[in-house]
Image (cartoon, coloured by chain):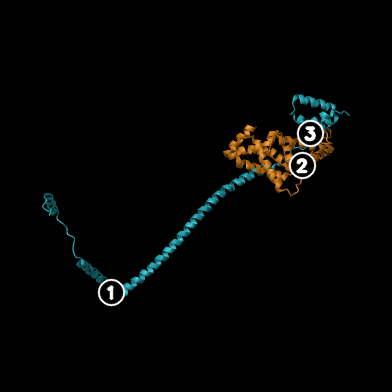
Chain colours: A cyan, B orange
Amino acid sequence: MKQGDTMICGWAKDNLLDFIDGELEASQVLMLKKHLEDCDRCSHEHEKILNAWKALDAWEDPMPPGHLRENILGSIYRRRTPQGLQRIFSVAAVLLIVIGVAFFYRGTDSKRYQERTADNKSTAVQLHTDITEENENDIIANLQLLREKEFYDSLDKLEKIDYLPLVEDSRNEDEKDKRSSLGLLAV
Amino acid sequence: MEDTDIALMELIKRGDDKAFELLLSRHQRSVYNLACRFLNDGAEAEDITQEAFIRVLKAAGTYRPEAKFTTWLYTIVKNLCFNALRKNRSVYIVSAEEEILPELPAHNDDPSEIIDRKRLKSRVVSAVNALPENMRIAVILHKFHGLQYNEIADILDCSVNAIKLRVHRAKTVLANSLSDFSPETK
């Protein structure tokens, strides 16, 4: 059994995988090749790695089942259609909710309006019946009295006024100005 | 290939179903292979392949060809695989591959050869599955998908050196677990 330089063995072991990968420089490649020829142990290690790596070739490519392609395309096209429909359904659902809410509020508002108008109507009818049946003449008479009272009150107010503001004649103003300018008014 | 993938993605972005079907035809096998090898579960790999392409379609609108298309695609698959692993952590993953997809022997195959090949394959699968997850996915991408360290680094979101180290360690581990294998035994 050939025994190479043990100093180089350490270096060879460290660089064996780079050597297999083809990543060593030319000079290093020559040195390692020479060492592998001289050293059985390193040469065996080298072969072991190469053989194991080659053994992996026994693991052939697993063949995908024939239905895989159809399954993939099927699932994609299936997904696509429901997604489109889902979008349409979601938009339709939102619209329905909005319309529903609008109708609901409109309905309650009109209900309230109807209730209110019904109340008002009944009150009006009540008043109307009261007025027509019993107090119509009284109200008319009272209205007449009220009008008369307002008239007399206005008269009282006029009588209580002590004086009415005087509106001076503009011609008198002009004369006053003339006099003051001539010093006639200065006393 | 890469250019046409990007061109297909542009067409998919505009709603071209045929372009998507073409992209699916091109990559469904590699996506399925990656998921199936990593999880060692054919049924799960089918689900992941399906989900990966659904995500591709969904993300087509925002896709930017900054990296290779396959790097982007494998990143999606990797994320789905890790999610599936986390989800099924407590569940024992049954290797259904042998049962679901039995390899039909060619008529001229020697039965003893078939048995040897199956035995070897079984050992290889066990050895790879025994690797830690991060190491395993790096090995699968490097060995079976022919990706360079820098591409794997992009997919796994780590440095090139880290990937190189993982693959080197994996090679050492595999060399020990498959130490009695020689090309002649195949």
Tags 2 and 3 touching, CB below 8 Å: no
Q: Chain of mark 1?
A: A
* Disc assigned to residue A54: 3
Relative to A2, residue B60 above or below: below
Label 2: how many Cα within 10 Å (few below 14, some 14–19, many 20+): some
Along the horizontal axis of the image, is B122 left or right of B26?
right
User: Circle 1 — which element?
Assistant: helix
Q: Amino acid at mark 3?
A: Lys
Tag 1 residue: A138
Q: Quadrant of the C terminus of chain B?
A: top right
Tag 2 residue: B129
Have a look at marks 1 and 3 and say if they share a chain: yes
Label 1: how many Cα within 10 Å (few below 14, some 14–19, many 20+): few
Q: Quadrant of the N terminus of chain B?
A: top right
Along the horizontal axis of the image, is A67 left or right of A155?
right
Have a look at marks 1 and 2 and say if they share a chain: no
* Residue A8 % position (x, y): 81, 28
Q: Report the Cα–Cα distance between label 1 and label 3.
A: 125 Å
* Residue A164 % position (x, y): 18, 62
Which residue reaches farthest right?
A: A1
In front of the other: A131 or B105: A131
In front of the other: A23 or A120: A23
Q: Report the Cα–Cα distance between label 2 and label 3.
A: 16 Å
Q: In the image, what residue occupies the spot 68% across and 41% down?
A: B78
Relative to B80, residue A165 above or below: below
Q: In the image, what residue occupies the spot 82% across and 25% down?
A: A34
In front of the other: B84 or B122: B84
Relative to A85, residue A43 above or below: above
Q: Amino acid at mark 1?
A: Asp
Q: Chain of mark 3?
A: A
Tags 1 and 2 touching, CB below 8 Å: no
